[in-house]
Image (tube, rainbow, N blue to C red):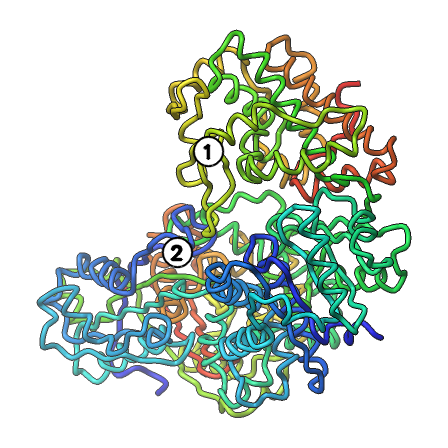
Amino acid sequence: MKNLRRKVYMTAGYNTISLGTGRKEFHPKKPRPGLEHYIDEAGKGCLEQIGGGKNVDECVIGNFMAARFNKQANLPGFFPMIDPDLRFKPATSVEGACGSGGLALTSGIRSVLAETAEVVLSIGVEVQNTMKAIYGADVLAGAGWFQERKNGHAYYFPGQFSDRAGAYFEKYGREKTRQAFARWYKNAIDNARLCETAQEFHNNTEDLEELAMMEPNGKVFVDHLNVFDCSKVSDGASSIAILSEEGLQACGLTKDQAIEVVAWSQVEEDITKPPQDLTSLTTIRTAVALALDRAGITMAQIGTVETHDCFTVAGLLGVEAMGLAEPGEGADFILQGNTARDGVIPFNTTGGLIGWGHPTGATGVHQAVTIWEQLTGKAGKAQIEIKKDRPYGMSVNMGGDDKTIVVVIYKQAT
Amino acid sequence: MGYTDKFRKVAVLGAAGKMGSGILLLTAMEMTDLMLQNKELKLVLYAVDVSADGLSGLLQYVQSQVVRAAEKKTVLLRKLYADRKDLIENGDVIEQYTKDVLATIRISTHLSDIYDSSLVFEAIKEDPKLKVSILREIDANSQESPWFFTNTSSIPIGELNTDAGLNGRIIGFHFYNPPAVQKLVELIPTEDCKPELIEFAKNYARNLRKKIVPSNDFAGFIGNGHFMRDALHGIIEAKKLNDQFSFAESVYIMNSISQDFLLRPMGIFQLIDYVGIDVVSYIMQVMNPYLPDEELHSELLDQLLTKGVKGGQFSNGTQKDGFFQYKKGRISHVYELKTGAYVPVDEIVKKSESFTGPLPQPANWKQVNFSPGKKEMLENFFSKLKSMDTKGAKLARNYVLESKRIGELLVNTGVAASVDDVNKVLETGFYHAYGPINNYFN
């Protein structure tokens, strides 16, 4: 699959706000919009840009745990609610934990490649603030192997990634690594402040790095990470249209409004096995290498990356897995400013999971929307400069602890 | 007998009351934690009250509070339940813990059920005679030489010790309201208090994560020693204003002075309402005989009580009518003594503000108390207040100085061992942003 058998484009991205602590609208005790609202808003947000549901051949929705967070399954049934023109059209729900959004992208890409659809509406959604964080941790732990849940931490995934951070500290040193975590946090918030839909858009803390250096407290949370090292609990949805060239024409869209999918990889690792190496995201490493090979490019040509920083340590290990830094040197790469919005390769330019938010099932789609905005000049205040020698964007979406990985490489459509 | 053994059979008297239910909750969780650490232990906790109705709602209250507490300590609970293979998710662990805590509790309206207790927490009505007769009855019928913890906030412990014939087996362990939330405990040993009882009380407080402030055994101790006198000052100042303003206006003005101008979480009349006008009056009545040089009594409170204006709270935590009526926790109306009616607060606010004059900024307890720059903010606020020549500023300065005088009196008369202890009680037990013994107006 070195070359795609036909061209695949993405356009008409839309994000709802990422709602949760940090947003002024959020009040834990007041009623909030439900799952239906987010699906409807994101769906309409995309459809309005492509001429409505009549132009859509197929729909796909990425979601992780609505069955527990919202006691709702059968999500494909919500598409006709968005637009009556979607009635009687094929719709599918895909799940791969926090990689569900990425699967919603690849599912749409496949349909276009298979020529069973010219236009696919792809939505990712998660509404997680329906329960307290301590119970939400149980739900999110479903991204791991349930047989291991008993031995896991109360905050299961923070516990998993805290173990990774602890192993990394031991192997490569603690102080500089923690400083790099703090810098990662600062970059995330700085970027989120430029994006109105970001959960941290209202964050006005002055010294972010000092705050993020708060010592972790294993008695109440986990041993090696503090709360600023973690993405928050979020409600939100994102949508994007995946189209063929014919699809673009049918919607009356021009290529300058779209990005092209240059290559993609979807890689799965055994959920019943612990990570081979706690200090390395080996599945992401494999997936990135595969996608780059398929695209026939190197990381030196990538102008911006949306990576899955559910935790700062995942951001750092991601940098290493992409080959941007040798193992143990990711902290230096970050501290030198390379991943900042004015750096060599800006990461997570609207805040990523830590800054923009992490409505788990929506994240993969949100990443694609951000890349689409950046490569087509629609990112508003968050816009970065895309240099000519680095015309590509890349998104890396992860489900579980380095288990379900989707990498997509994009460029401005021509 | 070790710390754990003392919990073999524990009783909380007055368990349906606000203080008793909190003590029951904390003790039930402590006993459950001990049993989870040592599976051989069989500990039991009796909730005793004269009110069967009160007891019927008690378990529901305890259940909801245990769930909240368990949600906060799930990291620890997962370790304590590590051997229970069936408890996998946090939700499973929290549910089991709640069941286990409730399973330690027995409910009773009969004192005879707890004659053989090893430990008794007393949180009944603030009535010395009643307390003595109940303590005496338990002790007389016990083979166990039980230890007694009394939650009295005003009666000297030595008097209960002597009158009930307990020979140093009683200690003052004064929780603040609500016990589940407030971090402060005043610890009051009698002169002949058993050292092992003091040691036990300290361990118990530490396990409950409470801050202990020792107080000498003097009626009212530190907390009420300050609060009752502070309240009287507010009442007297309001009475002075009554020449110029209506009763409702005077009360509102002094409440605003003691809250907004003093950066306290509540004004003095709201605090009296919160505690209960009847309770405040009763505590003064209990303390007064022990204070030969002072008259700790308020005719105004007596008058209000005869008119049925009592304050205090309903069992769901909402505020009953007192000096004020409240809507969603905020003052909505003010009581007018002359007519016996409540006046809308909106009709009073403007008049009050034009009399007191402006507030120095920042003028908000919440803003100041939780700020990292609290010290500078307080100094800044009070230095502005010092230089202001308004009626409000003058009343506030007098209030701050009177509060300081009371604090110093508590140290000078030996009720408190130190200035720090007084300040700690007001800062921790009353959530004041600063201690009463300060140098803001030197």
Badge nearest the viewer, 2 or 1 = 1
Instruction: State whether residue A151 is above or below residue B398.
Output: below
Residue at the image point whose x is 59% and y is 27% from the top: B362
Indicate the chain on which mark 2 is placed.
A
Q: Report the front residue among A1 and B376.
A: B376
Q: Which residue is mark 1?
A: B308
Quadrant into which the C terminus of chain A falls: bottom left
Residue A375: image location, x then y, percent? 36, 59
Residue B202: image location, x then y, percent? 81, 59
Q: Which residue is mark 2?
A: A19
Instruction: State whether residue B280 is above or below residue B39.
Output: above
Residue at the image point whose x is 42% and y is 61% from the top: A234
Indicate the chain on which mark 1 is placed.
B
| Crowd around label 1: few <14 · some 14–19 · many ≥20 (10 Å) | few
Q: Report the front residue among A69 and A193.
A: A69
Location of residue B415 (image quadrant): top right
Q: Which mark is residue B268?
A: none
Kind of residue sitting beneath label 2: Leu
Residue B381: image location, x then y, percent? 66, 24
Q: Secondary structure at mark 1?
A: loop
Quadrant into which the N terminus of chain A falls: bottom left
Q: Report the front residue among B27 and A324.
A: B27
Residue at the image point whose x is 19% and y is 78% from the top: A91
| Crowd around label 2: few <14 · some 14–19 · many ≥20 (10 Å) | many
Q: Secondary structure at mark 2?
A: loop
Instruction: Report the label total.
Output: 2
Location of residue B109 (image quadrant): bottom right
Instruction: State whether residue A109 is above or below residue A379.
Output: below
Residue at the image point whose x is 48% and y is 89% from the top: A269
Residue A294 seen in the figure: yes
Kind of residue sitting beneath label 1: Gly
